[in-house]
Amino acid sequence: MSKEQFIPFLKEKGISLSSTQLAQFERYFEVLIEWNEKMNLTALTEEHDVYLKHFYDSISASFYYDFQPGQRIIDVGAGAGFPSIPIKIVHPDIHVSIVDSLKKRIGFLEHLASELKLENVAFFHDRAETFGQNPAHRENYDVATARAVARMSVLSELCLPLVKVGGDFVAMKGAGSGDELADAEGALKQLGGKVMSDYRFTLPIEESERHIVLVKKEKKTPKKYPRKPGTPNKQPL
């Protein structure tokens, strides 16, 4: 997807970008490539790949979930800022926080936010498991997002403890999410979540399968979750 194709493809979905927003995506690409020479942020370095598989793919969450001004979003394991920074550019009135376990990536995100002149963003260097037990953050967010970080049963344990009762968990998955959802049914129930929708679509041009899974937080997450760092991955619920 070229930079030029990016605009009409988003317009088809009801998203019109201002010249400021387009400039932010251009600068995002430049900073990503600059920093990628120093540290491993992405395997994708061609402009058309970044615009399709990082920018457009990240924004696709907002095709199915209605982000509202003032919402507090937490992105778990965002790496180079996906999906929350592209979503923030498109929806400048949301508040975005990112938690990531690698200090260098947090440094990149802080620099990126400065370059893009983003307001109401916060970055935290922590493991998702310990972050989810921190009273300052636990059940403090309207929405949690994660993009293909781990299997649904693991993701749910990392994300749902951060969401307020009545809030939402938006999981961005590839093909095979149906099996993952079936496996995660018990985990979601234990953690206080309920799957409301599983939207399937194909990424334009390359036609690869994607899923946006919307989970409603219906009740408080038991205090023992998330478990100690590493445990959710080794022993999924």
Image: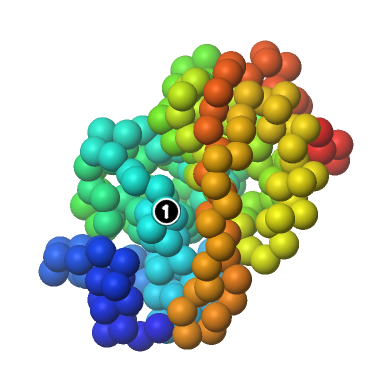
Q: Which residue position holds label 1?
A: 64
In the foreground, 73 or 195: 195
Q: Amino acid at mark 1?
A: Tyr
Q: Quadrant of residue 97?
A: top left
Quadrant of the drawing holding the C terminus: top right
Q: Is residue 67 visible?
A: yes
Give left or right: position of 156 versus 17: right
In the foreground, 69 or 46: 69
* Image coloring type: rainbow
Q: Position of residue 196 (x, y in %)?
A: 55, 40
Q: Position of residue 215 (x, y in %)?
A: 56, 38
Give left or right: position of 5 versus 222: left
Q: Is residue 158 visible?
A: no
Residue lying at 67% horizontally and 66% vertically, measured from the top left = 175
Q: Position of residue 116 (x, y in %)?
A: 25, 57
Q: Position of residue 227 (x, y in %)?
A: 75, 25
Looking at the image, the residue that sits furthest to the left is: 19
Looking at the image, the residue that sits furthest to the right is: 235
Residue lying at 34% horizontally and 46% vertically, measured from the top left = 66
Quadrant of the drawing holding the N terminus: bottom left
Residue lying at 53% horizontally and 33% vertically, measured from the top left = 216
Q: Quadrant of residue 3?
A: bottom left
Give left or right: position of 215 versus 187: left
Looking at the image, the residue that sits furthest to the front is: 196
In the foreground, 128 or 208: 208
Residue lying at 25% horizontally and 71% vertically, measured from the top left = 11
